[in-house]
Amino acid sequence: MFNKKSQMDIKELILTIVIAGVLFIVGLLIFANISNSAGKILDPTPLTIRNETFTINVEEALGNTNSTLLARLGVIENSESVINVSGPSVTLTRNVDYSIALLNGDSGEFTTRGNLTLLNISGTKSFNNSLLSISYSVNTQSEAQASTQVVQSTVLDSFELGVIALIVLAAVIILAIVFKLGQ
């Protein structure tokens, strides 16, 4: 008993391992909650797509439709400007000359796609078979969101690590009890 500096019995070793394991598990669970909510906190980067050109040629005999999908995802509603560039430069009016429906999500979500439909395809003010140019805004992934996604995809989920740590901690306790019973 006299020269027992820096020596410990099995009780102290088990207690130290249990406390360290519990602290490790609590830290992992806190990190899991923070990393899961980080993507929702960070704002996306808005980007304006300028002068995307397209032609809609509606011929019912060929089965062509009067709509086209916009090229980029993340479309923000009511941010577009459509201009006829193949004749007199005319700005088209939303819900009179064309409409845009959002597909696969709400306005500004990364999966949202815009579907432009020509409403005025016959008559004197028809834009059928005209070269049109559209400018619109989209949300893109910010650098912070991209970094968070890379970290989350390259490491194990913190909750899974916590479960593994709990299993290892239980194994250490069982081995310590078996060792103690063996004495």
Image: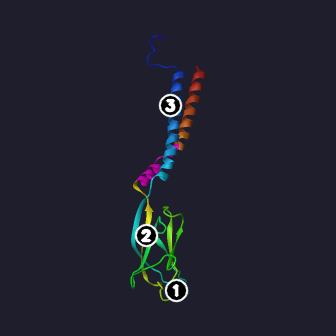
Circle 2/circle 3 CB separation < 8 Å: no
Disc number lying in front (2 or 1): 2
- Taking the spot 50% from the left edge, 35% from the top edge, the residue there is 24
The CA distance from mark 1 to mark 3 is: 73 Å
Give whichever of 146, 17 is nearer the camera.
146
Q: Amino acid at mark 3?
A: Ala
Query: Relative to 21, is 141 above or below?
Result: below
The CA distance from mark 2 to mark 3 is: 54 Å
Q: Which residues are magenta?
A: 144-158
User: Image check: 85 left or right of 64?
Assistant: left
Disc number lying in front (2 or 3): 2
Q: Which mark is residue 20?
A: 3
User: Image check: 53 left or right of 58?
Assistant: left
Looking at the rendering, in which quadrant would you find the C terminus? top right
Give whichever of 128, 10 is nearer the camera.
128
Q: Residue 52: horizontal and vertical position, in percent?
A: 41, 74
Give whichever of 25, 37 is nearer the camera.
37
Q: Amino acid at mark 1?
A: Glu
Q: Secondary structure at mark 3?
A: helix
Q: Main secondary structure of the magenta part?
A: helix
Q: Residue 22: horizontal and vertical position, in percent?
A: 53, 33
Q: Amino acid at mark 2?
A: Tyr
Earlier along the polypeptide chain: callout 2 or callout 1? 1
- Taking the spot 40% from the left edge, 67% from the top edge, the residue there is 48
CA neighbours of label 1 inside 10 A, class few (<14), some (14 to 19), many (20+): few
Earlier along the polypeptide chain: callout 1 or callout 3? 3
Q: Which mark is residue 59?
A: 1
Give whichever of 35, 93 is nearer the camera.
93
Q: Residue 39: horizontal and vertical position, in percent?
A: 48, 52
Asked if the stretch drawn in magenta spans residue 13, the answer is: no
